[in-house]
Amino acid sequence: MGAADVGMSKSRLDRIEPGLRSFIDRGVVAGSNAVVSRRGEIVHRSSLGHRDREAGVAMTDDTIFRIYSMTKPVVATALMMLQEEHGFPLTSPVMAFIPSFAATQVVNADGELEPQARPMDLRDILTHTSGLTYDFLLGSPADDAYRAARIMNDATRTLEELADAIAEQPLAFQPGAGWRYSVGIDVVARVVEVISGQPLGTFLQERLFGPLGMTDTAFGVPDDQLGRLAAMYGLPDLMGRDYSAAQLLEAALAGVNERHDVSETYPTDQPDTFVRGGVGLFSTIDDYLSFATMLLSGEANGERFLGRKTLELMHTNHVPAELLPFDLIGQPFNGWGFGLGSRVLMDVGRMGGHGSVGEFGWAGAAKTYFWVDPTESIVGVYMSQYMTGLELPEQVLRALTYQAIID
């Protein structure tokens, strides 16, 4: 079956590879993998440049990447699988699963601590409206507390220890009162462990990775497969303890693009300890394509993972209009809402690019990206290893995919 059989122009799809290669030729990324499918058929695949530029090792389809925040939709999916089984409401308070959150306080505009006006609930942590934050953000005393407590950059904490450490820090605002990108999905991950009675990695392997054939996706990389791991380039480590968003932006504007060792903050050899919800997974282009494709229908390989109404619930906007557009490091996401673990496209015109209402997906700090368009039955995945770059090869992939649709 060819591209025309699924309503795509092959000659137009052929524009994708040179578009992505231009980022390699200009030295923006060392190498990249990309794959696009429509109606279940792969219509584009490319492996360009190097996974290790200094060693001269070419990028290949089986290259392993640190996917950072593309871990989040996987863990959100795990919680929704449990929600289908147990029927608990998304308004359930987090403290019902992690008691330490009963004592979590909020830092108000005067810098004083006050109790939560209502308990933080599961939907809050899935949608980033909880008041939790991230070490690298600025603008709230809560961010300073996170940096002092090394919330993001201590890979020796277990997930349980991390959740309790997060609960000790103040919230940046009252639950539901704002949108702020955060460690909320790390808390979701601990809730998955509590409800399932299993370590997160075990649950994901048994319920998602194994059944979906995701053989290279895990919270570590075996020693005999380390040669397949892509080298990291770009800006200083976002999870390093010495950098804020402002400093990283300054480095980006200065054109910093160096090779980095991120093994301290994103270790390959601690799969039983470095278990997180917001970051931590390693994966390949084909593994993630399998996961993202499953999200189109909830089915794969003859097995149902999620029901249709659950998928609709996950991929509809849950953020009140007064909190939109949400903002990430000073960049407003015009036209987008946020569902349960993923962005959701609400207004194509305001977004200002190709797409369809109801499209969803997310990205990772080191230039990994995916999107799922149920209207067009398109799934796209882009992977490289460039830390927090300002250039957007993933948007070139999107644009050149949509312009190739002819039916």
Image: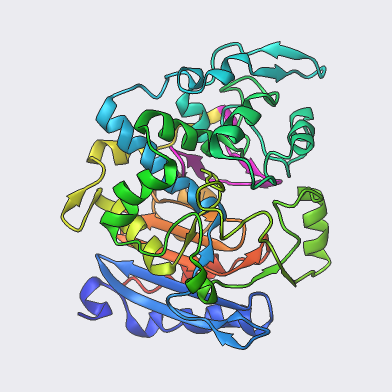
In the rendered image, which quarter contains the C terminus? bottom left
Range of magenta residues: 322-345
x and y percent of residue 239 in the render? 70, 51
Up-down relation of residue 386 to residue 125 (above or below): below
Up-down relation of residue 114 to residue 254 (above or below): above
Residue 363 visible in the snapshot: yes
Up-down relation of residue 228 to residue 87 (above or below): below
Residue 320 visible in the snapshot: no
Q: Does residue 62 show up magenta in the picture?
A: no
Q: Classify residue 148 by image quadrant.
A: top right
x and y percent of residue 76 in the render? 42, 40
Residue occupying image coordinates x 43% and y 42% = 200
Q: Please tell me which residue lies in front, 70 or 55.
A: 55
Q: Please tell me which residue lies in front, 106 or 348.
A: 106
Count all numbered tags in the image, as a single digit. Answer: 0
In the rendered image, which quarter contains the N terminus? bottom left
Residue occupying image coordinates x 68% and y 63% = 389
x and y percent of residue 32 in the render? 54, 75
Q: Please tell me which residue lies in front, 370 or 228.
A: 228
Q: Classify residue 292 by image quadrant.
A: bottom left
Residue occupying image coordinates x 63% and y 35% = 180
x and y percent of residue 332 in the render? 63, 45
Residue occupying image coordinates x 83% and y 58% = 250
